[in-house]
Amino acid sequence: MWYELHPLERILIWNFNIAVRIFLLVASLFFILKVNIYFGIFLLIFTIVNFKRYFKAQKEILHEEGTPEEFLDFKSRKILLKTLNEAEILKTLDVDKIFLNLALKEKYIKNILARAGIESKEFSKLINGYEKEIEGEIKNSFKKILVQNIKSILNKSYLEALNLGMNYIPFGILFIKFLEYDPELVKKIKINLQVDEEILFSAFLIEEFGKKIRVKEKYQITKNIFVKPKKTSFVNRAWTSRPTPLLDSMSEDLTFLASLGKIGYIVGHKNEIELTLAVLEKPQNNNVILLGEVGSGKTTILYHLAWLIKSDKVPKNLFDKRLVLLNLNLLLEKEEEVIARINKIIYEINRAKNIILAMPDDPRTEKIIEHFKDLVISQTPLIVLASPENYKNLSKHPYVVDTFTVVRVGSLSEKETLTLLTFELITWEIKFKIKVTIKALKTAIKLANRFLKPRLLPGSARELMLETINIAKIKNLKIVDENLVAETLSQLINIPVKPPELEETQLLLNLEEIIHQSLIDQQEAVKEVSEALRTYRAGLGKTKGPIGVFLFLGPTGVGKTELAKTIAKIYFNGVMTRLDMGQFQEVNTIDNLIGSESTSGILTESVKRKPYSVLLLDEFEKCHPKIWDIFLAIFDEGKIQDFTGREIDFSNTIIIATSNAFSEIVYQKIRENKTYEEIKSQIKEKLYTIFPPELLNRFDGIIIFKPLSKEDIKSITNLKLKDLKEKINKIGYEIEIKEAAIEKIIEEGYSEVFGARALERTIQERIYDVLSKKILANEFTKGKKIIVDFQNEWKFYQI
């Protein structure tokens, strides 16, 4: 290996190789001019070809075996040679710093940094801002360690190039791997430049493939205008297949499209592809249902299978197969002819013996799947794409369940999605004539993965990016950045996803005070809920689970439900789902929560539609223990699956469960003058007699609501009457409620058993109802003050 040689040997070999080629070039020109023109031309062609090969990698990754250094292009070899020589001369292991400094002189690398949003000068300052010391033991084995480090970097570069399907190791990949060599340097770049290795990798992809894709796009436009692609012969290599004219007219041959290079590229989904191929090569029951959400990549997997078949990268019994996707719009035209068409298509497929038939993700597939039973019996592979909803209908057919293998298509990782959408970003910029920053793309992926579930990556992120680009075009913006992505998502789902701005920050910092404008006392509960919301919006919330999960305990009418309503009103735009858990005392009521074939789930549907909300579980102790198991998963992971298998996300929900359990003990201990902490400790111990420990341990806070004092009741009454005064003022009247009337409301509206629960009803009956009748009867004159008093009886008059 040339990098193990002495520096002088490396320089001599490098210069000798170049000198030989220059000599051949001069010799060929000499022969052309002075000796033999034909031999000279031959020698010139040989030299040019040799020069061209010299500037490329010595071997191709996808077609030849070799060591990583044999797959380096000329520029990578040159910079690596200089790096090694300088490192050995200086006796330093800082090969990353040397390589990066040399690479920074190249325009190619400057372009990558610029696309990542980094200035070359800032980057240079950063990488030269620290030193490493070589310990004595390392000095003694310097050359060995140096070679090991270079080997490690080259191996990682080789694997990255192989993963991308490239034939050589590009200079950009080598640059990134040298950058990642020192974790401390990566950390510095993240902190100081707000750029990570994923953003740099995307910038490399844009620089490496951008020009090629742009040229290809322009060429394709021209080609589509002037050249119509001819369909190749559908006969297999053994010349045993037969034509399928009707099938061809009602389908798209994906293997043909793959041969044109129009489809086939894929990122991720390795397990799904391997499992699908394993099923397709079986002699029996070789049928697959690719099951996944819209945008999960089912069609992309199908396209890649076509490319694998065309490239002979499949099991031998799948060689020469044609993967054909049915067009249901054409197939289902003229309903009376559909069955005859299907029978004819099955006849053609059985006769051809080289077809793999695919059906799109479409509700109409269920209506025709039974008619393809004969095709399945004949062992012709059938691939059906299906969303969870469509699969629910398909699974009603027994033969589908018996003969099809379900391959679940999962979401791509955020890193895989970034790689995939980086290529699409290049085409978006061409199509929409707008620049999209990599940070915007990465932000879209992160936000989509968090807020747009159950939709999966990459589809959810792609939709968000295209919507953002559309808004940018409407606003005549030239650049799509991460702020615009966050604004777009906030508008789409009504969830705050950007860092809090001044108005929201002030609300969060003063949340307790604002809540207490509508709620009296219960300081601990208000504080815990406020802290959970502040932590969530500061970006320091839990890595999994809802925003917060709280159990409010205490007597009726002390503010448990009122606090939930107040939080929803102040911070969640009034969005709250309230479930009376007393309605779920039987195990069969689980279907009412998560849904079934005959009904949608109250819980899952409400959170799916409005994920940013308050979920109130009233009288939580009354539901069946099996239902607690459902909430155990929600409290812990922040997600569950509905009856179709779709994931429902609760991570943007604050959950409040209430219970009246042991209320009598609370009153008893208060009469005994026990402290709040003593009462709280005793009640928590008794909770284990009702709830399982694993459920109680999932609550972020278990809060005891204190019974309300007479002073609290008076404050609550004044709050309720304040609302009344505001409503009266809006319709042109002024009102004064005398102290005697207030005392009478408290007397009638409060009891130790029901707390303040009856207050609102008392105010409604004693004041609202009477005022409404008198206003409608024109008994009051606008502009005059209405007096409400109680002197042995209720009095309403004006002064």
Image: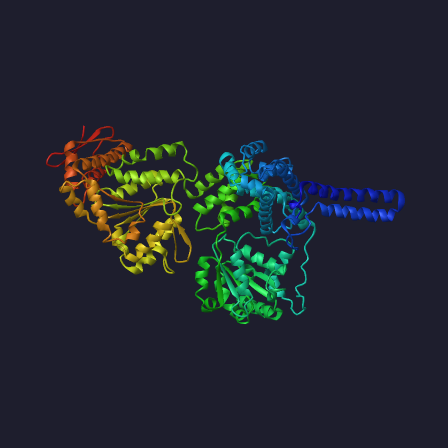
Horizontal side of 657 relative to 388 (left or right) equals left
Residue 341 sits in quarter:
bottom right
Nearer to us in this view, 14 or 298: 14
Residue at position x 52%, y 42% in the image:
441
Quadrant where the C terminus lies?
top left
Q: Is residue 290 left or right of residue 773?
A: right
> Is there any visible trace of residue 203 in the rendered image?
no
Camera-nearest residue between 425 and 605: 425
Return the x and y of residue 35 as percentages of the image width and height: 89, 45
Q: Going by the image, does 12 lie left or right of 775?
A: right
Residue projecting furthest to the left: 792
Give the x, y percent position of residue 355.
59, 65
**Residue 70 seen anywhere in this rendered image of the structure:** yes
Q: Pick the residue in front: 11 or 564.
A: 11
- Colour setup of the view: rainbow
Percent of width and height locating residue 55: 71, 45
Q: Nearer the viewer, residue 247 or 292?
A: 292
Vertical side of 324 occupied by 603: above or below: above
Please, which residue is most extreme toward the right here?
A: 35
**Vertical placement of 381 versus 570: above or below?**
below
Q: Position of residue 164 (x, y in %)?
A: 59, 50
